[in-house]
Image: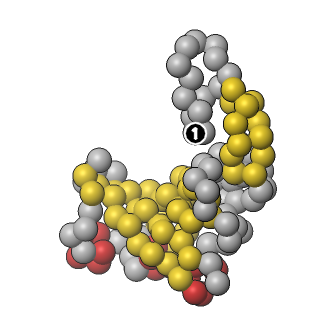
Amino acid sequence: MPEFKVVVADPEKGRSYQVTLEGEDAERLIGKRIGDVINGEIVGLPGYKLRITGGTDKDGFPMRPDIHGAGRHRVLLDGPPGFRPRRKGERRRKTVRGNTISEDIVQVNTVIVEYGEKPVEELLGEGGEEE
């Protein structure tokens, strides 16, 4: 049974909220890709639309939108996510995840693209972290 920590970023307020998903709601995320828009009801935000922006797997490897599939790959990177070059032109081979959510993913990052009637603080609580 998969379990995800979904981080919901609110660009208007500059805050983020963490929601834990288990069971059937978590299974609805499997197979989704970075860039897909999902219904906010999955995380308790009726009327909201969320866009998946990334995530990490159980060992901390980040997801990359330009790598297809759900598995890990060792690729040559020249910028984020997964590698931050220290000098101009620096490249490095790093292990990253593909852009598809699987059971190995632990954290899924999302951003609100369409707001509902009620404010986010009312639905998810005041547990937002300021960015």
Depth check: 2 or 39 in front?
A: 2
The image shows residue 93 at horizontal and vertical percentages of 73, 31
- Few, some or many C-alpha atoms within 10 Å of disc 1 (few <14, some 14-19, many ≥20)? some
Residue depicted at 30% across the width and 75% down the height: 124
Q: Is residue 31 visible?
A: yes
The image shows residue 40 at horizontal and vertical percentages of 46, 73
Residue at far bottom of view: 24
Q: Quadrant of residue 19?
A: bottom left
Left or right, 50 with reference to 14: right
Residue depicted at 77% across the width and 40% down the height: 74
Left or right, 73 with reference to 48: right
The image shows residue 56 at horizontal and vertical percentages of 58, 55
Depth check: 89 or 115 in front?
A: 89
Q: Quadrant of residue 101?
A: bottom right
Depth check: 16 or 89 in front?
A: 89
Query: Which residue is disc 1 drawn over?
Result: 81
Q: Is residue 118 visible?
A: no
> Could you say whether the residue bearing mark 1 is in a helix, strand or loop?
loop
The image shows residue 68 at horizontal and vertical percentages of 77, 50
Residue depicted at 39% across the width and 76% down the height: 45
Residue depicted at 68% across the width and 45% down the height: 96
In the image, residue 5 above or below residue 22: above
Residue type at tag 1: Pro
The quarter of the image holding the N terminus is: bottom right
Depth check: 87 or 114 in front?
A: 87
